[in-house]
Image: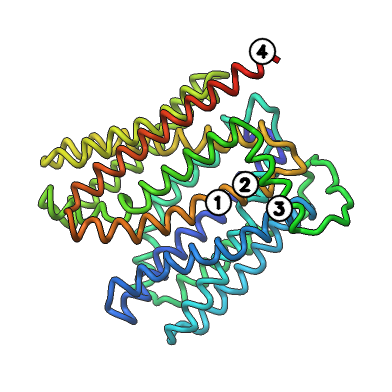
Amino acid sequence: MLARPGYRRLWAARTVSQAGDVMQLTTLALLIFQMTGAGLGVSGLALAEIATVLLLAPVAGPLVDRWPRVAVMVGADVWRLAAAAALAVRHDDVAIVYALAVCLSAGSVFFSPAANSLLPSLVREEELVAANSGIWSAAVLIQVALAPVAGLLATTAGFEWAFAANAASFGLSALLLRGMRSGEAPPPVTTTTMWKQRRQALGLLGRDRLLRALAVAQALAALSAGATSALLVILAADQLSVTGAGYGFMLSAIAVGAFCGPLLLTRLGSRARSPRVLFGAFGLRGLVDLVLATVTALPAAVAALVAYGVGTSVGSVTFSSTLQSHVPERLRGRVFAAFDLIWQSMRLASLLLGGVLADTLGIRAVFYLGGLLLLAAALTGAAAAGRSVRVRRGA
């Protein structure tokens, strides 16, 4: 895939941009915790990110479909460069840090659907799984490698240097994308309002059986994963009696599985985008949550989390590839933004409900419920997708 100039540029830009995102997440969490001394202050970063998506995704989708997608991505990178540079200069006030963190998240709201919508114009349809796998694998390696580096840089050289490195990553991403020949059709000239454009995308989600199945699965998965991912540290402490290095092993296990998942996908060829693989990934994660709620030994939990990482990466790659091949180009930005909106809104509900459930019924109840929700996502999605396939064959 890297032999293709357009894909090579997009892959490099997304990898560099992902490096900036990892630096941002790690450094901001450390800074906010140092300034507030409270976990609530750190969780406020996640809430600010979710609120930004909920506010801007309805606008980002139509704009991605109206404007050249490369230009949207370059503009988002320049915006994030400015915000990260401002953080390098001013990070001594909590209110300013939160405001600039929101600005950084706002750039990602535009960058992500534009990048996902652009990819099908750079590769052939049968190459989408391999193309998405390449981007995903690079992102996982960047996260594993740079998260500790970002923390070390912030605590030794200072937060200003970590934020400056973050700003430089966005600048490099913009330079890689600038002038890239995408091969996509020029955006249609339209006088339709953005509100009507949003309704077109929502109408497609309502009419299309496969997209409805994906939306239901996305909602159930986010309602599960929002709480379980955030509360995994509590499961480690309360049920497995591990902290520190033990919890680090658990996170590393997820990363190992997430890296292996795309490697497995590329061996499936055309079968990689089948409903069985797509929704089976949700089911695998659901089974892992049930295992985690049951076991009390760290080795068993680590093995299960490797499988969870495989399910996460396989599901993400096949999900994106299916949307890219199934949705018409003129609607792609709005559809990707709509799915971002579904994910973040249900993730917010999950974070709020998960904390209450953990305090009242215990952490096991959170993971048992999360597993059941993911199994429900797998079953309802597979059933709806199967009906969609039968309808198309009958037509």
Spatial CA span between label 2 and label 4 = 28 Å
Which sits in the foreground, 78 or 214?
214
Residue type at mark 3 is Arg
Which sits in the foreground, 340 or 24?
340
The residue singled out by tag 4 in the image is 394
Q: Earlier in the sequence, mark 3 or mark 4?
A: 3
Q: Is residue 278 above or below residue 256?
A: above
Q: Earlier in the sequence, mark 1 or mark 3?
A: 3
Spatial CA span between label 3 and label 4 = 31 Å
Q: Is residue 342 above or below residue 103?
A: above
Q: Is residue 195 left or right of residue 147?
A: right
CB under 8 Å between callouts 1 and 2? yes
Q: Which mark is residue 198?
A: 3
The residue singled out by tag 1 in the image is 340
Spatial CA span between label 4 and label 1 = 32 Å
Residue type at mark 4 is Gly
Residue at 79% x, 54% y is 66
Residue type at mark 1 is Asp
CB under 8 Å between callouts 1 and 3? no
Q: Is residue 394 left or right of residue 256?
A: right
Q: Which mark is residue 336?
A: 2
Most extreme residue toward the bottom, as rendered? Answer: 93
Residue 35 visible, this orientation: yes
Q: Is residue 287 left or right of residue 99?
A: left
Residue type at mark 2 is Phe
Q: Position of residue 331 (x, y in %)?
A: 73, 44
Residue at 32% x, 36% y is 286
